Amino acid sequence: MLQGMTYNAMHDQELLDLRAKCKALCQKYNGLPINDENGRKSLMKEILGKTPDNFEIMPTFWCDYGFNIEIGEDFFANHDVVILDPAKVVFGNNVFVGPQCGFHTASHPIDAQKRKEGYETAQPITVGNDVWFGAGVQVMPGVTIGDNVVIGGGSVVVKDIPSNSIAVGNPCKVIRSL
């Protein structure tokens, strides 16, 4: 899975168990009182395995495994963020994620029979430093986003975005350099 090879997400018991454990932790996290900052940070550290000193992830938050996600210092994710992480998802420092954003490393086969059988692949997502994602942005498998980038709300990012850019749309395209 982590090597980008085809794997079976529906019938591999180890993957099923890991996702179930992570989903239970996410559910617990989403149920904590919003003012329980210490409890939320502690539980997020359990979900991700490690966290920086300064970060905030608002509920609701969902991910598949957690241990494949790395967040940098001063990371902020607003409400309703989903990170599907069968491959690595790495965020640099000073990243702001608007509400209802998704980061999706998994991809399914075009062949219907293989999809039905549960096969999929995953490609990593990498986000640089000083990046802002507007509300509702969706980032697809294998994308790299450079430093100092703004992705406009509602964009669907299917290709790499270079540093020092403003990019918007579906598919997301650079409209201006910074």
Image: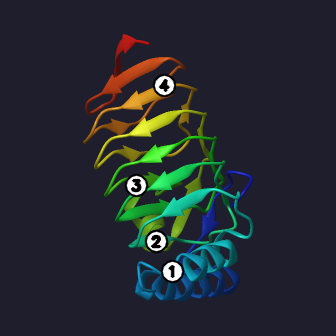
Number of residues whose C-alpha sits closer than 10 Å to that of mark 1, classed few (under 14), some (14–19) or many (20 or more): many
Residue 30: % across, % down = 43, 81
Residue 90 shows up from this direction: yes
Give the answer, above or below, for where 44 lies relative to 89: below
Tag 2: amino acid: Trp
Query: Looking at the image, do the residues carrying marks 2 and 3 touch, with CB atoms under 8 Å apart?
Result: no
Going by the numbered disc 1, the residue's amino acid type is Cys
Number of the label disc, if any, that sits on residue 102: 3
Decide: marks 4, 2 in contact (CB < 8 A)? no
Residue at mark 1: 26
Q: Is residue 152 above or below residue 4?
A: above
Q: Are marks 1 and 2 in contact (CB under 8 Å)?
A: yes
Residue underneath mark 4: 161
Q: Amino acid at mark 4?
A: Ile
Disc 4 + disc 1, Cβ < 8 Å: no
Mark 4 or mark 3, which is nearer the start of the sequence? 3
| Quarter occupied by the N terminus | bottom right
Report how far apart the C-alphas of labels 2 and 3 lie in the structure. Answer: 10 Å
Which mark sits nearer the N-terminus, 2 or 3? 2
Residue 178 occupies quadrant: top left
Q: Earlier in the sequence, mark 3 or mark 1?
A: 1
Answer with mark 4 or mark 2, whichever residue precedes in sequence: 2
Residue at 30%, 28% (x, y): give it.
168
Residue at x 62%, y 72% (from the top left corner): 65
Dot label at residue 62: 2
Give the left or right position of residue 49, taking residue 71 as reference. Answer: right
User: Percent x, y for residue 155?
Assistant: 29, 37
